[in-house]
Amino acid sequence: MIGSQEHPPSRKEKERTNHKEFAPASYGQIAKTFDVVLKVTVYYSHLPNCEKSRVISGWLNAAVDTKMMAMLKRCYPKALQPWLSTVEQVGREDYKKFPHKVVRRFIAEKHCGKILLVQFDDIYWKILNR
């Protein structure tokens, strides 16, 4: 039992029991998971080999999360109308045009095109989660 009248639950106890309702995964959530798996397999593990990994890494997408989407929205508020604010909201058609189109623009403008999409989420995950 968590908490009682005499001992209310602590913040940590409340956080452990605060779960979202069960719902099937959205296209965006599945696509992000797939992007992460490909990143680990190809970019970090250099599979199938180093030479092919370098080529394939250029084709990989950024694994954009909700915080990154909020950052991109601040930079490009008119890039998508209505703006999707969570990965859960990203459907199949949205995924084709967003967020990678906006990430490419961000990389071109803020990094002079010198980082890969697959590097974007590593860099900005660290920045946004400090």
Image (spheres, rainbow, N blue to C red):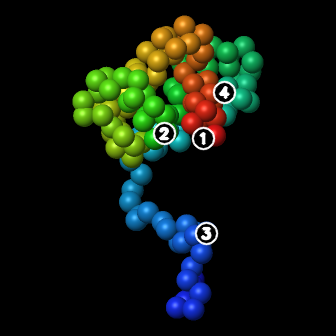
Q: Which residue is mark 3?
A: 12
Residue, far bottom: 6
Residue 130 falls left or right of residue 26? right
Alpha carbon distance from label 2 to label 4:
24 Å
The percent coordinates of residue 26 (x first, y second) are 38, 47
Q: Which residue is mark 4?
A: 42
Quadrant that contains the N terminus: bottom right
Element type at mark 4? helix
Residue type (three-letter) at the residue carrying disc 3: Lys
Q: Earlier in the sequence, mark 3 or mark 4?
A: 3
Question: Is the residue under label 2 in contact with that under label 1 (CB below 8 Å)?
Answer: yes
Element type at mark 3? helix
Residue situated in front as seen by the camera: 70 or 49: 70
Q: Which residue is mark 1?
A: 129
Nearer the observer: mark 2 or 4; the answer is 2
**Residue 105 falls in image quadrant:** top left
